[in-house]
Image: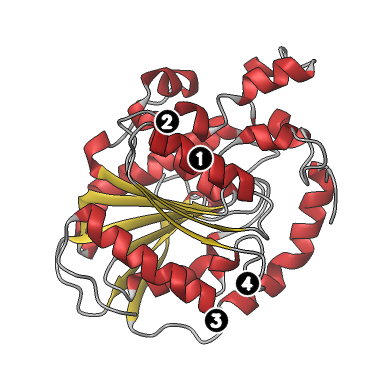
């Protein structure tokens, strides 16, 4: 396994993998849903400020809404690779929003949280036009996208964190009914462990400029990383969570730590955790709908959304 991959090496790897991943993950498109693509949620014409809305054919009104943020190490990735994953959830009876956001290294977590807030503001104003219920929203994401979703959920419930990022949330906490985490970077303490795959350059890259001056020492960097790490902001007001991971995932320990912290605060948590014997469960395997393990995740996700949004039973995909 690679050890301590620098940011620039990660970007190069992802740039080479991106086109093939786009084709591989979207084979045999789902045709039982309607697609509205590249909607400008911020009104500035920037590619990073586009989202797709995917709706089941003949959708009834007031369906639950699943808002998804793609992964890619904060520096890479695009919503297009997650089209089939998102369509799979829409086919089960949800309105799915698949969103892009500004990425590092040009931008940091400040801008990513701002973009997540803009996406949720757009959902509040417009998702009813697509049959979605703006008061029954579940956030989700994989890897870095899962961290963005989880940190935004914390922003809504923790005023100190909202103030740190200068965000007045576009939605009220009651509208966010749940959070879905696929192999997510929810505990930044694992990045400081010896031999972890990602370098500490990822932490420095994501911090606001005003915070970087205090990160010349490892201790200073750990303290600053608190504002990037969703696990540090869990409290009893946190929405219910569905966590999926495996022993083959390099954020496996982060996910387990997150589950433990949530349960300590009495937050409802559903989990689907695979052991190393399940070979199809490498990091973010959930994106690949061909795997039986992914279909298990989708069934669990459907049950979770139904439970936390209190809707009529969702259909099978």
Residue neighbourhood size for the residue with mark 4, other residues' Cα within 10 Å, grouped as few (<14), some (14–19), many (≥20): few
Whether residue 203 is situated above or below residue 50 in the rendered picture:
above
Q: Pointer 2 and pointer 4: residues touching (CB < 8 Å)?
A: no
State the residue at coordinates (77%, 34%).
Answer: 201
Q: Label for residue 278?
A: 4
- 170 horizontally vs 272: left or right: left
Model colouring: secondary structure
Quarter of the view holding residue 298: bottom left
First in residue order: circle 3 vs circle 2? 2
State the residue at coordinates (71%, 21%).
Answer: 221
First in residue order: circle 4 vs circle 1? 1
Q: Pointer 2 and pointer 1: residues touching (CB < 8 Å)?
A: yes
Marks 3 and 2, how far apart at CA:
34 Å
Q: Nearer the viewer, mark 3 or mark 2?
A: 2
Residue neighbourhood size for the residue with mark 2, other residues' Cα within 10 Å, grouped as few (<14), some (14–19), many (≥20): many
Q: Label for residue 258?
A: 1
State the residue at coordinates (55%, 81%).
Answer: 290
Marks 4 and 3, how far apart at CA:
14 Å
Whether residue 48 is situated above or below residue 94 in the rendered picture:
above
First in residue order: circle 4 vs circle 3? 4
Residue beneath disc 3: 290
Q: Label for residue 234?
A: 2
- 291 horizontally vs 181: left or right: right
Q: Name the residue nearer the viewer: 269 or 148.
A: 269
Q: Could you say whether the residue bearing mark 1 is in a helix, strand or loop? A: helix
Q: Could you say whether the residue bearing mark 4 is in a helix, strand or loop? A: loop
Q: Name the residue nearer the viewer: 54 or 180.
A: 180
Residue neighbourhood size for the residue with mark 1, other residues' Cα within 10 Å, grouped as few (<14), some (14–19), many (≥20): many
């Amino acid at each position: 396994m690679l050890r301590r991959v620098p940011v620039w090496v990660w970007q190069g790897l992802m740039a080479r993998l991106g086109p093939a991943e786009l084709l591989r993950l979207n084979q045999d498109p789902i045709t039982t849903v309607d697609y509205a693509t590249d909607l400008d949620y911020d009104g500035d014409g920037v590619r990073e400020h586009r989202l797709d809305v995917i709706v089941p054919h003949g959708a009834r009104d007031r369906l639950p809404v699943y808002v998804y943020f793609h992964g890619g190490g904060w520096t890479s990735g695009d919503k297009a690779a997650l089209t089939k994953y998102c369509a799979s959830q829409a086919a089960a009876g949800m309105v799915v929003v698949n969103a892009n956001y500004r990425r590092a290294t040009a931008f940091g977590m400040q801008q990513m949280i701002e973009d997540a807030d803009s996406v949720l503001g757009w959902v509040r104003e417009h998702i009813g036009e697509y049959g979605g219920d703006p008061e029954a929203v579940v956030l989700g994401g994989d890897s870095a996208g899962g961290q963005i979703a989880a940190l935004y959920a914390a922003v809504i419930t923790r005023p100190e964190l909202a103030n740190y990022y200068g965000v007045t949330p576009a939605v009220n906490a009651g509208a966010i009914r749940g959070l879905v985490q696929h192999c997510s970077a929810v505990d930044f303490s694992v990045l400081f462990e010896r031999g972890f795959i990602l370098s500490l350059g990822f932490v420095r890259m994501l911090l606001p400029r005003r915070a970087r001056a205090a990160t010349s020492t490892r201790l200073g960097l750990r303290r600053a990383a608190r504002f990037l790490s969703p696990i540090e902001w869990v409290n009893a007001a946190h929405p219910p969570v569905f966590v999926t991971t495996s022993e083959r995932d390099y954020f496996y320990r982060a996910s387990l730590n997150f589950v433990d912290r949530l349960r300590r605060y009495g937050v409802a948590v559903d989990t689907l955790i695979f052991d190393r014997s399940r070979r199809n469960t490498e990091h973010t395997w959930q994106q690949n709908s061909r795997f039986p393990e992914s279909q298990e995740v989708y069934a669990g996700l459907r049950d979770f959304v139904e439970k936390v949004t209190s809707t009529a039973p969702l259909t099978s995909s």
